[in-house]
């Protein structure tokens, strides 16, 4: 791979790590304790809590009418979750691909926020689940693509998944035939995640 591309990818990873660290440092200004894997806030009544009845009175009719559409997406999301989980349980050991840890993608901690009412907490849980499953499925798909078709696209793509930097250049048939088997096994950078 082009050393300039490798350098840029290293810089991107370093910036992502720095961004995550900075976001986590900002969280230190809030009152909570991390115990084991749980995040616990001090139990106290929050003056910013919007009571349920007041919350419902202020809800827009458009938001209320869209609720069934939003929640209907939960069914295919659950099916996607089951499907990709079964797929990787069955196929990844056959291919020698490291499994994706589902727990790294599904983070449920917003229910501890005292300023959210029950509907807001339920909505946050839904968004955490949906976005977590999409990220989990994308990582499973990325590892699968690295195994079966590690070729970059000719056209511009809007986002790169975590494995794309390992792919071969579009149109480079010689490299594809020479290096495909090595790329299929190139998961050394994954540390059981």
Image (spheres, rainbow, N blue to C red):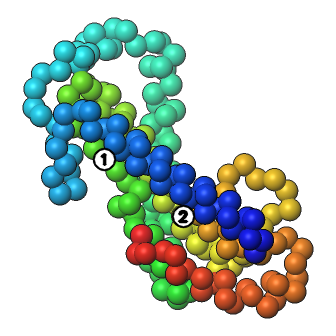
Q: Name the element at disc 2.
A: helix
The quadrant where residue 140 appears: bottom right
Label 1 environment density (alpha carbons within 10 Å; few <14, some 14–19, many ≥20) = some
**Left or right: 186 as drawn, with respect to 44:** right
Percent across and percent down for residue 160 are: 66, 57
Relative to 55, does residue 4 appear above or below in the rendering? below
Q: Is residue 110 visible?
A: no
**CB atoms of marks 2 and 1 within 8 Å:** no
Percent across and percent down for residue 4 are: 75, 65
Relative to 64, does residue 25 appear above or below in the rendering? below
Which residue is labeled 1 in the image? 108
The quadrant where residue 7 appears: bottom right
The quadrant where residue 78 appears: bottom left
* Quadrant of the frame with the C terminus: bottom left
**Which residue is rendered at x = 10% and y = 26% of the image?**
44
Relative to 46, does residue 112 appear above or below in the rendering? below
Which residue is labeled 2 in the image? 139
Relative to 182, does residue 120 appear above or below in the rendering? above
Q: Earlier in the sequence, mark 2 or mark 1?
A: 1
Q: Is residue 104 visible?
A: yes
């Amino acid at each position: 791979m082009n050393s300039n591309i490798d350098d840029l990818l290293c810089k991107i990873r370093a910036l992502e790590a720095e961004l995550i660290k900075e976001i986590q440092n900002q969280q230190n200004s809030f009152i909570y304790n991390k115990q084991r894997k749980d995040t616990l806030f001090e139990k106290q009544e929050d003056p910013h809590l919007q009571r349920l009845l007041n919350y419902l009175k202020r809800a827009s009719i458009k938001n209320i009418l869209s609720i069934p559409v939003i929640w209907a997406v939960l069914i295919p999301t659950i099916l996607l979750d089951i499907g990709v989980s079964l797929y990787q349980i069955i196929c990844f050991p056959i291919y020698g691909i490291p499994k994706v840890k589902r727990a790294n993608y599904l983070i449920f901690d917003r229910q501890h926020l005292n300023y959210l009412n029950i509907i807001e907490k339920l909505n946050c849980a839904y968004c955490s689940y949906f976005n977590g499953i999409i990220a989990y499925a994308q990582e499973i798909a990325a590892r699968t693509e690295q195994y079966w078709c590690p070729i970059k696209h000719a056209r511009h793509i809007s986002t790169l998944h975590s494995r794309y930097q390992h792919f071969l250049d579009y149109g480079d048939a010689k490299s594809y035939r020479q290096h495909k088997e090595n790329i299929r096994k190139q998961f050394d950078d994954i540390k059981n995640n």
